[in-house]
Image: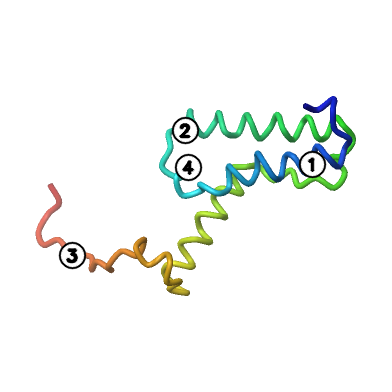
């Protein structure tokens, strides 16, 4: 669709359809295999190149998707454990105490 849209239209389409969909499921991507994450990064890279080549890249946030994925995941974990957001309560795990091993390690 890049030939149908101007620079601003490409950036809006990217942010609305690609970036938002990928960031929405950040916790789901957290446990994915590296080869699957590489495919997501490839989609992100292609979208960034299309926008940059169109001339809209001047104001475009080119943060790597892997970084955005990590930040989003950490943000959710902070909300779960520190802010205790009610709708994320089911993600909270009980604290476990570390046990000290006695004797030599096997």
- How packed mark 4 is, by other alpha carbons closer than 10 Å (few <14, some 14-19, many 20 or more), is some
Q: Where residue 70 sits in the image (x, y, percent)?
A: 54, 50
Rendered position, 86 above or below 40 = below
Residues at marks 1 and 3, CA–CA distance in whole angstroms: 52 Å
Residue 29, numbered circle? 4
Sequence order check: which comes first, mark 1 or mark 3? 1
SS label for mark 2: helix
SS label for mark 3: loop
Q: Disc 2, disc 1: CB below 8 Å?
A: no
Q: Which tag is nearer the camera, tag 1 or tag 3?
A: 1
- How packed mark 2 is, by other alpha carbons closer than 10 Å (few <14, some 14-19, many 20 or more), is few
Residues at marks 1 and 4, CA–CA distance in whole angstroms: 23 Å
- How packed mark 3 is, by other alpha carbons closer than 10 Å (few <14, some 14-19, many 20 or more), is few
SS label for mark 4: helix
Of 83 and 88, nearer the camera is: 88
Residues at marks 4 and 2, CA–CA distance in whole angstroms: 10 Å
Residues at marks 2 and 1, CA–CA distance in whole angstroms: 27 Å
């Amino acid at each position: 669709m890049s030939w149908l849209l101007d620079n601003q239209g490409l950036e809006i389409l990217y942010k609305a359809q690609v970036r938002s969909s990928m960031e929405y499921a950040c916790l789901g991507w957290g446990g994915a295999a590296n080869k699957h994450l590489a495919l997501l990064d490839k989609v992100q890279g292609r979208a960034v190149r299309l926008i940059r080549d169109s001339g809209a890249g001047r104001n475009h946030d080119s943060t790597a998707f892997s970084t955005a994925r990590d930040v989003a995941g950490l943000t959710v974990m902070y909300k779960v454990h520190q802010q205790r957001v009610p709708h994320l309560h089911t993600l909270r795990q009980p604290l476990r105490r570390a046990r000290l091993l006695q004797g030599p390690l096997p």
